[in-house]
Amino acid sequence: MLTAAASQMSPANGTRVAQAVRTTTPPKIDGTLDDPAWQAAQAIGDFRQREPLEIQPATQKTEVRILYDARHIYFGIHCYDDPSGIIANQLRRDLSMDLDDNFAIMIDPTLSRRNGYVFQVNPLGTQRDGEIIEEQAPPGTDSIIDPSWDGLWVSAGKITSDGWTATVEIPFNTLNFKGGSVVNWGINFRRFIRRKNEEDKWAGYRRIFGFWRVSQSGLLEGLNNIGSGRLLVIKPYGLLGAHAFEGQSWEALHRIGGDIKYGLSSNLIAVGTINTDFSDADVDQQQFNLTPNPIFVPEKRRFFLEDSDVFNFLLWNQDLLFFTRQIGIDPVSGQEVPIDAGGKIAGHVAGFDVGIMDVKTREVGFNPYANYSVVRVKRPLTPGSFIGFMATDKESGSPLDPYNRSGGVDAKFVLFQNLNLRGYYAKTWTQGLSGDNAAFGGRVTYANNWFNIYAGHGVTERNFNAEMGFVTRTDDQPTIATLTFTPRPHIRGVREIDIGPGFFDDPNTLGRTIFREWNATVQVLFQNGAIAGATPQDVVYQVLDQPLHLYQNVSIPAGNYRFASHQLNYASAGDKRITYTGQFQWGSYYTGTLKSATLTADYRPNPHLALGLNNTLNVFRLPQGDFEIELAGVQVSYAFNRFLNATTFIQANTADLKAVSANFRIRYTFRPDSDLYVIYNAGSRFQSLAAGNPMQVREQKLAVKVTYSWSR
């Protein structure tokens, strides 16, 4: 039997080491550690705080035990605590667990020090999983994970008299690695204690290291004489139902198709899809565009979400050379464009990170048939650093736009673990456009425990036309500079104060200022997780070369404008059954004034029921006309258990004459990664990306969909 010292010793380089123990009898995955098999593995402990008191011992004891056999690895987790203080309400898979106590396992099965898989579980045994690629942080406000990747694994949890326990079983073929007589993995663990807003980690517990920093993980040893885990998943589907576009009669729906996923090697995965269906994808939350620029709407379709980081090519700020929302969705009307077939290969081969994708869409409405291809290659350097290349090609059935192509090179260098340098150069080719078709720039970010810096400069020429990407402005040479101080004063209840200015300057390529903004913000982060913030002054200078359509017959005339606004915001702590956020912004707006108020609230009375409310009210007072735009949403979810749930999402948008949209969905997971859906949609499913708030396609759809996942 292993000793405690052997289970987590630290060699000369400071890497923490854990040991796995082989078992001949698989332990029960019942959420408890009562099975005697767990006692063969030594407990791994000594977790340290990342938040709030960096590197200090965790306030609650945590132990992890690791077993394996010929086909699986098993984790037994014991989170010691006062059971009356444990918060556990989430029963739906892949939703955020930031409002619950939770525990996460990070596995780097190829010891790449850049890529890995995350498996997260709460005291109810609910699952959330995701993939880390090139140590990229998750999008949005998610704390540790982008849940777009789904793996096959089993979990269970239970609240006990001395805390909570969880058991996890992960098949080797889920991890897609190369076996051998001696196999080592990267490994890390993270525990979150909700009521204390405390984050504890086993390795890499410095504040500047998020859980996605795979290079800071420990080492798992003891995996001996195990075969390769080669992934193969075949997932067909069948769908029956009916649909009708607004003003048209109902038509029957009957469709079959499917996906296949295969591990070409330990680091390279191929995915294919035929007659792809996205009926079960989440609908977009409706937005009202206040700017003359397109709006960014995140991808929610599963085929495009998986391995999306591989295809990431950042241009200026948040612009992208390749954006999957341009495939299969009309960017103006939001109409779904059917996908006949698609395929992609993503992973690591011969020292390079590689991504290849090809998707064919069929003709529908005003959208001609098209074929979209993209190739992405990156050469990893030190952890987090790379040099790369991307090429895209769109071939279309439209004689006015038969092709659109792009190519670019980029590089990212991470120095001293917290200094990030990034640069890019890209060009596009489109019929009828020649010259002035490049985009290039660079930026630097630096972060430590006292301040953050973000600065950069770019140029996007007037004929740069990335039809497969997302570009906010062309004929633009923007500059950005922000400085945020992050002191942690000794004030009761306060964890951190973030304060600093921001400056944004966007002249066109001839030097004429088109947009300029400067602001100052302050934000107070409280120990319980609440956040209070203010923007005392936000000044914008905007040139409109053409009228900006806002609502019905109301447009802002072309001209030069300067306006200023002020903002207050607050987000409550996450340890209560009711959580809420509020924001109020007021000030001048082009030719008049605008007041905007936003409220979101969530109520979770028990693990089964969740109620959500969001409401945004924009009050315009303009010489062109006074009007109000309200966007409201109500979401009701009921989870009968971890495998059966129902969700209703109703939205209202008074900018639309047909103001109400509704989505109702029942999901029953009858076996891992195999589901039965009952779906009803009425209204708009996908948000338009275009400026000017164009009218969107409305549709009613009723469907029953079954997916069945087979894996070896």
Image: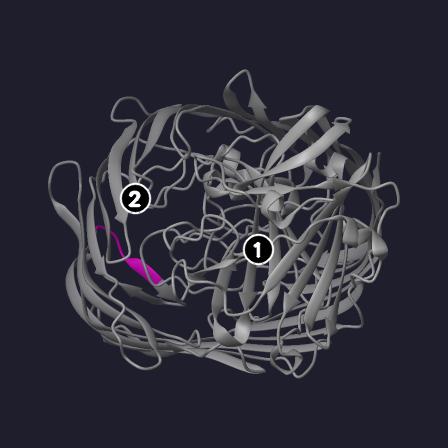
Residue located 69% across and 81% down the image: 606
Residue 686 sits in which quadrant? bottom right
Instruction: Count neighbours of disc 2 (C-alpha within 10 A) and say few if under 14, some if 14 to 19, many if 20 or more.
Output: some
Type of amino acid at the residue the image marks with label 2: Arg
Given residues 468 and 536, the one toward you in this image is: 536
Which residue lies most toward the left here?
Answer: 511
Residue located 50% across and 65% down the image: 58
Given residues 182 and 692, the one toward you in this image is: 182
Per the image, the residue denoted by label 2 is: 473
Residue 115: x percent and y percent?
54, 36
Per the image, the residue denoted by label 1 is: 686
Residue located 69% across and 50% down the image: 42
Q: Is residue 66 above or below residue 604?
A: above
Task: Give left or right: position of 110 versus 384.
Answer: right
Task: Give left or right: position of 431 versus 578.
Answer: left
Q: Are marks 1 and 2 in contact (CB under 8 Å)?
A: no
Task: Give left or right: position of 550 versus 103.
Answer: left
Q: The residue tagged with tag 2: helix, strand or loop?
A: loop
